[in-house]
Image: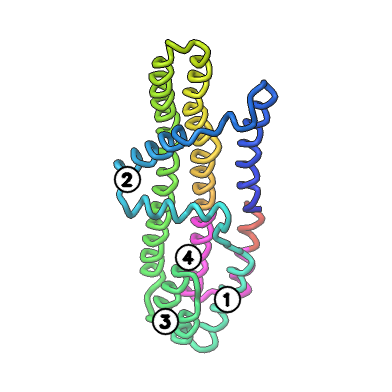
Amino acid sequence: MQWLSLAGMLLGFGAIWVGHVLEGGTANGLLNLPAAIIVLGGSFAAVIIQTPMAVFRSAMIRTFWLFFPPRHSRETLLENLCEWASAARRTGFIGLESLAAVERSLLARKGLSLLADGQPPHAIRSALELDMYQLEDAGLQAAHVYDSLGGYAPTIGIIGAVLGLMQALTLLEKPDEIGTGIATAFIATVYGLAFANLVCLPLGQRIKHLVREEYLYNELTIEGLVAIAEGEHPLSLRYRYENLRRGE
């Protein structure tokens, strides 16, 4: 499913290119390196100015979510919760310490460690919810970086178009070349609009969707760990989970 996002981008750029050719443009008429440098360089520069470097770096890392989104299997989570609940009933909470050492999810690992330390349910919930909110905030800040790119790119494209028109005006002594110069100038505007609406804004929304999925998954993880801390039976835990799924 993750490749559908890339396919959507390619379809969008392909539609622009095919439409350009059908209207009488040349196949390479939309290729302009200076316009690409102005739009991409200017847009990223504006975002770097307003964004803390840690947030910007996090946003760039999350670009890979387009191809390799984080996987959150609720079925696997349920099986893990039931296994942890059974282990807690057999060996006590101290037996969860070994399970925490091999758990890949940082949130679940911390929750199991808190259980093994004998922390009460309310303390476990408070600690894990704080981590959950921080993860959500980091994801939303990363999405905001792409929203900002989508806001700046069209304006930077207009700047590129103005620069191109300035160059076209130097061709007044060559009337046959003015039309070509003006057409080339507006390529920067096309780049800005396409980059914003086919890359930045969709990617920002995609990240927000994945952040929301991660939040719901972490919320279920916390509810399950708190239920284990309260001594809930594995079968009761499974029943509660199935009710939550039916309510979605």
- How far separated are the C-alphas under marks 1 and 3? 17 Å
**Taking 225 as reference, is 29 left or right?**
right
User: Magenta span covers which residues?
Assistant: 213-241
Whether residue 14 is situated above or below residue 115 in the rendered picture: above
Direction bottom: furthest residue: 91
Q: Which residue is mark 1?
A: 233
Which marked residue is nearer to the observer: mark 4 or mark 1? 4
Q: Which residue is mark 3?
A: 116
Q: Position of residue 97 (x, y in %)?
A: 44, 84
**Residue at image coords 61%, 36%:** 13
Q: Could you tell me if the residues under marks 2 and 4 are in contact, i.e. CB atoms within 8 Å?
A: no
Q: Which residue is mark 4?
A: 222
Direction right: furthest residue: 22
In the rendered structure, which amino acid carries the disc numbered 1?
A: His
**Residue 145 or residue 208, whichever sits in front:** 145
| Crowding near the residue tagged with mark 3, few <14, some 14–19, many ≥20 C-alpha atoms within 10 Å | many
Q: Position of residue 154 (x, y in %)?
A: 45, 29
